[in-house]
Image (cartoon, helix red, strand yellow):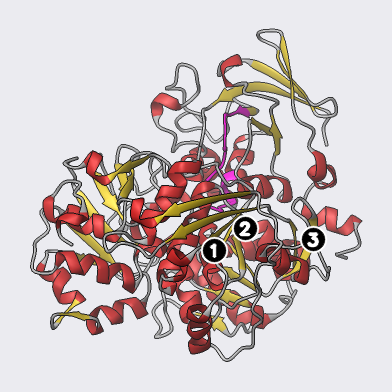
Amino acid sequence: MGMTLTEKILARHAGKTSVVPGDNIWVDVDLLMTHDVCGPGTIGVFKDHFGKNAKVWDRHKVVVIPDHYIFTADEKCHRNVDILRDFVKEQDLPYYYDVGSEKYKGVCHIALPEEGHTRPGEVLFGTDSHTCTAGAFGEFATGIGNTDAGFILGTGKLWVRVPETMRFVFEGPLPPYLMAKDLILQIIGDIGVDGAIYRAMEFSGDGVFSLNIEERMTLCNMVIEAGGKNGVIEPDDVTVNFVKSKTKKPFEIVKNDSSAKYFYEKVYKTKDLEPVVAKPHSPDNKALVRKVEGTPLDRAYVGSCTGGKITDFIAAAKILKGRKAKIDLFIVPATTEVDRNLDKEKIDGMTLREIFKEAGGRMGDASCAACLGGPTDTFGRLNKAEVCISTTNRNFPGRMGSKQAQVYLASPYTVAASAVEGKITDPRKFL
Amino acid sequence: MKKQIRGKCYVVGDDIDTDQIIPAQYLSYSLSLPEERKMYARFALSGIPEKNQGLPEGGRPFVREGEFKSDYTVVLAGKNFGCGSSREHASFCMREAGIKAVVAEFYSRIFFRNSVNGGYLIPFESDGRLVENVKTGDEVEIDVKANTFENISSGKTFHLKPLGEVLPIIEAGDVFKYAKTKGMMK
């Protein structure tokens, strides 16, 4: 029987010729990623169960990226980075991106591809739910907890249940006012925050294959917000060219069998879609932007693994150029590379950084920052009953700080347009 | 594995995500140092808005101010419990507060895995929605072998779905003990 690309990758990593959804299998892991929030716990689990002097199964397959609580006065956060640093030294791990060093990156899901760690056909686990972002590179990637990660550190294996695949097809190139964020918010609104639990979400159609690699990452990034296990896009020339520009490691392209079976399929015509937001307090609380236009706002936020890539900042800058934000505007590049590119990318001779500064934007350092609230001194954190429109991924109560705050999720276009007007605004006004 | 789990029940609604279970500002506490790990119990379920804390009335904190244990033994929830981030601190904080089992219509994948593989608590799935059948503070008993959930306060008994393929891991204690029974670990 034909297999989907998710099924094929899992079968190969379990040493099987075929698998079907529902099978419980043990897979060999190509890469484990951890960070400062879940790394210390993962290391603790590993030492508890494999011994104080145990060595990780393969030091070339472990990537450690501190990114969550970096620019804070909270000493416990610094202590947690110290735990990572000591472990990396003890295990002699080659892939560590230390705080305060030239190697520091920022948000792990964006740092992984920048550093060549995402490759088609592989199995990647990470101690963060947005690890699914890497499915944009045609691999199986999903988030796990400390126990599973500690188990992998010792054995290089993990049991997984083979997921059914739901396929979302976008026909036609994206109109100039839509971004990948609109597409994924549309899907989550349609199927709900529990619409894909335990399932793979595959994105296809010429609309998807016309997207650049960063926009594809945005699609896969938010599958977890529908409960999805992994998001995935079949690799094409865009994927291969990107990956080859970042790593010399060999990889194998895996594609869907033509006879693959899908649990569900939905076709969208992109020309029929409009900019959308997710209203408070759930990512599936979808509304057309034009239906909520005029909603008063206190803050606009552009950042995170979902909306802090250079593509996101180019989009926001297109609208913000020559305009001022009427509300607080926070700009947080996902990684140091994105940060540097704010000075390289230009629109009509002005760098993105200059555009944001002129618009009144407050510039943050590369990290997860206020996407998930974090320590109370986190840059951009919502500390009271504020209303924020954000390019981030979640808006459950308290996600960005105070549980009295309200968060609207939207594309960088919509966030920028809303910042200019000080209220929710359809970006078509400026495009 | 205990055959019966009995105690007071704490009732919450749908889509309780990990930021409501344990807000991100507390994740810097150590999971191993006793003085810090007790803070996880202190702040367990503290991110739930007050009106939804302990249904049906709300306004009933899961852990009382200044305490490090909850009065409750079982959490009853609606759909999609534990959605959101992969933080294992979510299962951990509930165990630290004294929770032995959660009963929900269904779970997010990662919370379910963490609870089972880490051996923190048993994530039962109810056979249909039970949230409206129990009040926070009701005495309940789960029969782990018979897969039943009894509201002792009201005298009503409900079916739970069998634990199925994860039962061997729960019976072993956690994924490490299970792997040892399978010869995958020494």
Residue A104: image location, x then y, percent: 42, 79
Alpha carbon distance from label 2 to label 1: 9 Å
Give yes or no for contact between labels 3 and 1 (Cβ–Cβ under 8 Å).
no
Looking at the rendered image, the disc whose residue lies closer to the viewer, 3 or 1, is 3
Marked residue chain, label 3: A
Mark 3 or mark 1, earlier in chain: 3
Residue A28 falls in image quadrant: bottom right
Element under label 3?
loop
Asked if labels 3 and 2 touch by Cβ distance under 8 angstroms, the answer is: no
Splitting the image into 4 quarters, where does residue A103 fall?
bottom left
Residue where numbered disc 1 is placed: A131
Give the magenta-colored segment's residue range.
B75-90
Tell me which label, 2 or 1, sits earlier in the chain: 1
> Does any portion of residue B126 appear in the rendered image?
yes
Residue B93 percent coordinates (x, y): 58, 43
Report the side of A317 relative to A44 (left or right): left
Q: Is A156 in front, or is A104?
A: A156
Marks 3 and 1 on same chain = yes
Q: Residue at point 54% right, 73% down?
A: A137
- Which disc number belongs to residue A1? 3
Residue B80 lies in magenta, yes or no? yes
Residue under the image location 61 percent in, 82 percent down = A93
Residue matched to label 2: A144
Element at badge 1? helix
